[in-house]
Every structure is written in C-alpha cells, then in structure tokens.
Image (cartoon, rainbow, N blue to C red):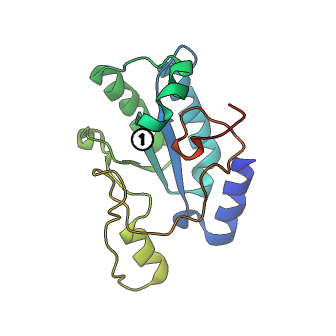
Amino acid sequence: MIIPAFKQLARKIGPGKIIWRYDPIFISAKYTLSYHIEKFASLAKTLSPYTKKCIVSFLDLYAKIATKMQKLNIKKVSNEEIFTLMRYYAVISKEYGLVLETCAELWDFATLGIVHGSCIDKELLTQICGKELNLIKDKTQRPLCGCMASVDIGSYNSCANGCLYCYANGNFKNL
C-alpha cells in the first residue's frame, strides 16, 4: 500500500520533491545486518525512479515505547556494524543515483559521502517554491534533528500497522 502511494505521489509532483525514509534501523534476530542490506537494495531499486533522496535513521529508544520494544529483542549494535551497514548503503545509493543522508544521528559518515540531512528540508522547500523562505529549525524535535518547523498532518494513535517501535501509537490497543 505504501510503495504504490509513494510512486503515485512522485508521478504527480515529481521525484525531486519526495523523500524516501528508511527507518528505523535496528538489529534483532529477524532484522539482521544482511536483512537491512538486502531490503535497502530492493527498495532503492524500486523507488529510485520516484525519488532523488533517501534519509536513514537508527532507532531511538523512547521511554514511552520501552515496554513494547522488549518484544523485539533488539541487539546492541556496535559502531563497526553501523559503519559497515552505512558503507553498503552508500554504495547502493550511488548505484541507483540517490543522495543518502542521515536524520538526527550523532555519527559522522561524511567519509562515505553521507551527510546529516533533514526531512523537512529548507533547501528543498525553497527550490520547490522558487523563492527564499524564512524558515526556522523545529524546536520540538530531537536536538540533532535538522528539520524546519512544520505542521504534522498525522495524528497520534491512528495508524493501524501496529509497529512496536512506533512512538506515535503509544496506546494502540491491538499490539
């Protein structure tokens, strides 16, 4: 359902105006490094005609989802594993002509050609509007988030997917 909607939106507004997010990245018995590399490559191949940029982010362990997260048996990921994964993502992104950025991450992947980015991107919005915009950083986001202030059109506890890692469905009854 999400990929067809992504493609349809890109066809309507253009691939330069839609950003693909690959997140949250976490490691468990099911979601291994190999899984993430294969899934990222598959999605990059599928989505690259419909976007120019991908933003990746590792899972943030919010207190309000801590109980749900225990069910996932998440493995602590070493810096070496993180950089290995990002090296693969950099190669895959380049192969498909995608700009790869991170969202609110402490790690510096500049040597891999990956910079810190933002999902609500001032440069992209300025380009789309065709004029300089007077935007400010969103003060309600995590400190490392580079997003501009915006109004979220979603609402909490409304998604039916039931992802255990989702901070927006803290009270979802069907988990």
Residue 112: x and y in percent read: 29, 39
Q: Position of residue 30 (x, y in %)?
A: 58, 17
Name the residue at 43% across, 17% down: 75
In this rendering, is residue 175 above or below 30?
below
Q: Residue furthest top?
A: 29
Residue 31 in view (yes/no)? no
Q: Amino acid at mark 1?
A: Ser
Secondary element under disc 1, as helix, strand or loop, is strand
Q: Is residue 91 left or right of residue 41?
A: left
Residue at x 37%, y 61% (from the top left corner): 147
- Mark 1: give few (<14), some (14-19) or many (20+) Cα within 10 Å: some
Between 50 and 36, the one lying in front of the other is 36
- Name the residue rendered at 69%, 48% in the picture: 3
Viewer-closest of 18 and 23: 23
Q: As displayed, is residue 115 above or below residue 92? A: below
- Can you give x and y, in whole percent of width and height, for residue 160 in the image? 72, 43
Seen at 37% across and 19% down, the residue is 76
Residue 122 place in picture, x, y as percent: 37, 70
Side of 37 relative to 153 (left or right)? left
What is the quadrant of the C terminus in the image?
A: top right
Can see residue 162? Answer: yes
In terms of image quadrants, where is residue 135?
A: bottom left
Task: Name the residue that disc number 1 marks.
Answer: 57
Count of numbered badges drawn on the protein: 1
